Image (cartoon, rainbow, N blue to C red):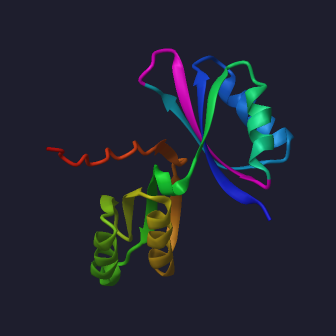
């Protein structure tokens, strides 16, 4: 059985790097569950967050390290990482069901970003599990359209230890 792994990949911000990373993984038969890329605080660099299904993560890392524009690869442990996604979902919402749907949405802090005659479009942000739970609860109303970003993630900073005062 293959496991899902989240990798943070620091790359040079150059044309074609995203395509090379994706094609390298696909050629090796690794399923990319999610891929998001954006700029970093360091000029000329980008960070990719890649969620990949792979039985052996070392093989994935070896393949990526072979690419010339890859600078650093870090596996992010879900317990020690901050992970977020954003989703827009259009839900069938006839007038008689709107209050019920809005109540469900409020539990998840979903924001209604568009209201039409028979639908409401929500924006939901948060941990992937929260987004999936929201989908499970609104699915019975009828999802008309759905789009999700790729997962983005950062390793958590270690907590500072409290020092005991001596004296």
Residue 53 is inside the magenta segment: yes
What's drawn in magenta, residue-wise?
Answer: 41-55
Residue at left offset 37%, top offset 61%: 122
Q: Position of residue 91 (x, y in %)?
A: 44, 69
Looking at this view, name the residue that lies furthest to the bottom. 96
The front one of 42 and 138 is: 42
Residue at left offset 73%, top offset 36%: 22
Q: In the rendered view of the protein, which quadrant contains the C terminus?
A: top left
Count of marks, rendered view: 0
Q: In the rendered view of the protein, which quadrant contains the N terminus?
A: bottom right
Looking at this view, name the residue that lies furthest to the front. 167
Looking at this view, name the residue that lies furthest to the right. 28
Q: Position of residue 123 (x, y in %)?
A: 37, 57
Left/right of residue 45 with respect to residue 73 in the rendered view: left
Looking at this view, name the residue that lies furthest to the left. 167
Left/right of residue 60 with respect to residue 76 in the rendered view: right
Regarding residue 23, the answer to whether it shows in the image is no
Regarding residue 5, the answer to whether it shows in the image is yes
Dominant secondary structure of the magenta stretch? strand
The front one of 159 and 131 is: 159
């Amino acid at each position: 059985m293959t496991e899902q792994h989240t990798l943070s990949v620091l790359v040079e911000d150059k044309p074609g790097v995203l395509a090379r990373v994706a094609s390298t993984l696909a050629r090796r038969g690794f399923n990319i569950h999610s891929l998001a890329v954006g700029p970093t605080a360091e000029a000329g660099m980008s960070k990719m967050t890649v969620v990949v299904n792979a039985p052996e993560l070392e093989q994935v890392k070896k393949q990526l390290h072979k690419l010339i524009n890859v600078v650093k690869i870090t596996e992010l442990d879900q317990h020690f990482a901050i992970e977020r996604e954003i989703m827009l979902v259009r839900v069938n919402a006839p007038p008689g069901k709107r209050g019920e749907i809005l109540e469900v949405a409020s539990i998840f802090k979903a924001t209604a970003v568009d209201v039409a005659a028979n639908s409401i479009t929500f924006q939901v942000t948060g941990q992937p599990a929260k987004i999936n739970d929201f989908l499970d609860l609104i699915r019975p109303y009828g999802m008309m359209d759905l789009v999700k970003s790729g997962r983005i993630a950062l390793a958590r900073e270690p907590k500072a230890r409290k020092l005991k005062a001596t004296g």
